[in-house]
Image (cartoon, rainbow, N blue to C red):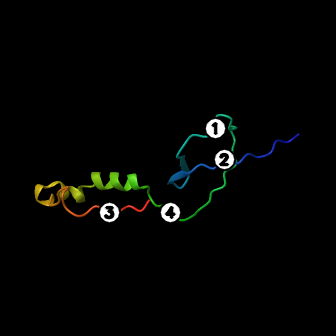
Amino acid sequence: MKKAWQAVEITARLENADLIRLDSPLPRSAPQRLRVIVLLGPVEEAEEIQWLQAGMSNPAFAFLNEPEEDIYTLSDGKPLAHAG
């Protein structure tokens, strides 16, 4: 009796023309030989934390750490009314 195919969805990154690196490991029960279907879609937007980390480590934004850029205080502005 032939076993049915099992589908597992995992995101990955293409490192070069013939190397795909998975973002997470395959299940331990995965066989040694796999059938791979590649779906080419729109580029996913980076998560907010990735954008924040990129901004913090990018030297183009280093000027924001200078004292003259620190122009706001906690007393500036007005609180927003939150309609829960």
Position of residue 77 in the picture relative to residue 18 (left or right)? left
User: Where is residue 83 shown, x and y percent of the image?
Assistant: 41, 62
Q: Residues within 10 Å of mark 2 (few under 14, many from 20)?
A: few
Q: Residues within 10 Å of mark 3 (few under 14, many from 20)?
A: few
Task: Choose the circle earlier in sequence order: 2 or 4.
Answer: 2
| Residue assigned mark 1 | 27
> For the residues carrying marks 2 and 3, which lies nearer the camera in this image?
3
Residue situated furthest right in the rendering = 1
Tell me whether the residue at label 2 lies in contact with that at label 3, contact meaning CB atoms closer than 8 angstroms: no
User: Where is residue 42 shown, x and y percent of the image?
Assistant: 53, 65
| Residue assigned mark 4 | 43
Secondary element under disc 3, as helix, strand or loop, is: loop
| Residue assigned mark 2 | 8
Residue situated in front as seen by the camera: 75 or 36: 75
Secondary element under disc 4, as helix, strand or loop, is: loop
Residue situated furthest left in the rendering = 68
Secondary element under disc 2, as helix, strand or loop, is: loop
User: Mark 3 and mark 4: span between their CA atoms?
Assistant: 34 Å
Label 1 amino acid?
A: Pro
Task: Choose the circle earlier in sequence order: 2 or 1.
Answer: 2
User: Mark 1 and mark 4: span between their CA atoms?
Assistant: 25 Å
Question: Residue, x 34% and y 54% (percent of image)?
Answer: 52
